[in-house]
Image (tube, helix red, strand yellow):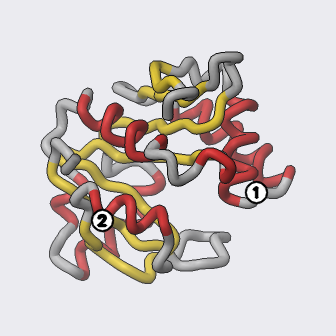
Amino acid sequence: MDDVAVGPLDLAVRVDDALAVQALAFGLTDDEIGVRRHIVLRHLTSPGARALGATTPGGRLVGFVYGMPNSRTHWWSTVVEPYLRHQDRDHWLDDSFVITELHVLPAFQNRRIGRELITRITDEAAEPRSILSAIDTDSPARGLYRSLGYQDLARRVLFPSAPLPYAVMGAPLPLKR
């Protein structure tokens, strides 16, 4: 991480840079990027929404995270709530900071950048816990989340138009180091 700095990110200004990172890290099409651009900009109007970026000395964005205090009225919460309720875990939707997106360019992965992004943003959270969703596979991302203390709260969560099921994960704050 010596050549990458993590700090506040004006995501509204750098939304296209962030979506370029997400497209490479997550495999998005141009159409998906267009849809997500509107979603990100709408999320940024939520109270308490904030973002961090990982940049090179030249200012290239190589990773980012953003999130906000969760609200049961957010679309994401309305989708995951029945899955969490079925597991008697829907209380996780209250008093939680949700990690909305976390992505690092493939060439910069496995350098502790994702870990630094997520721990720094949750360190600033006033909420006692954090929640997120990740594709429900045994992936490096899920391994990172588990190492930080996140546990599966619900699995096989289906989001409209998502081709793969997701897992909802939660962790008490502060995260493990």
Sequence-first disc among 2 and 1: 1
Residue 91 location, quadrant: bottom left
Residue 45 visible? The answer is no
Residue 17 pos. (x, y %): 72, 31
Q: Is residue 173 above or below residue 51?
A: below
Is 174 or 88 nearer to us in this picture?
Answer: 174
SS at mark 1? loop
Answer with left or right where residue 156 lies relative to residue 123.
Answer: right
Report the residue marked by disc 1: 28
| Residue drawn at 39 percent across, 46 percent down | 115
| Residue drawn at 42 percent across, 37 percent down | 117
Q: Residues within 10 Å of mark 2 (few under 14, many from 20)?
A: some
Answer with left or right where residue 134 lies relative to residue 55.
Answer: left
Q: CA distance from mark 2 to mark 1?
A: 25 Å
Q: Residues within 10 Å of mark 1 (few under 14, many from 20)?
A: some
Is 168 or 5 nearer to us in this picture?
Answer: 5
Q: Amino acid at mark 2?
A: Arg
Q: Amino acid at mark 1?
A: Leu
Residue 15 pos. (x, y %): 68, 29
SS at mark 2? helix
Residue 98 visible? The answer is yes
| Residue drawn at 46 percent across, 21 percent down | 7
Q: Is residue 56 above or below residue 42?
A: above
| Residue drawn at 18 percent across, 38 percent down | 127
Residue 48 pos. (x, y %): 35, 26
Answer with left or right where residue 3 lies relative to residue 21.
Answer: left
Report the residue marked by disc 2: 146
**Residue at the far right in the pictured view:** 30
Is 27 or 165 nearer to us in this picture?
Answer: 27
Is 40 or 147 nearer to us in this picture?
Answer: 147
Name the mark on residue 118: none
What is the tally of numbered marks visible in this picture? 2
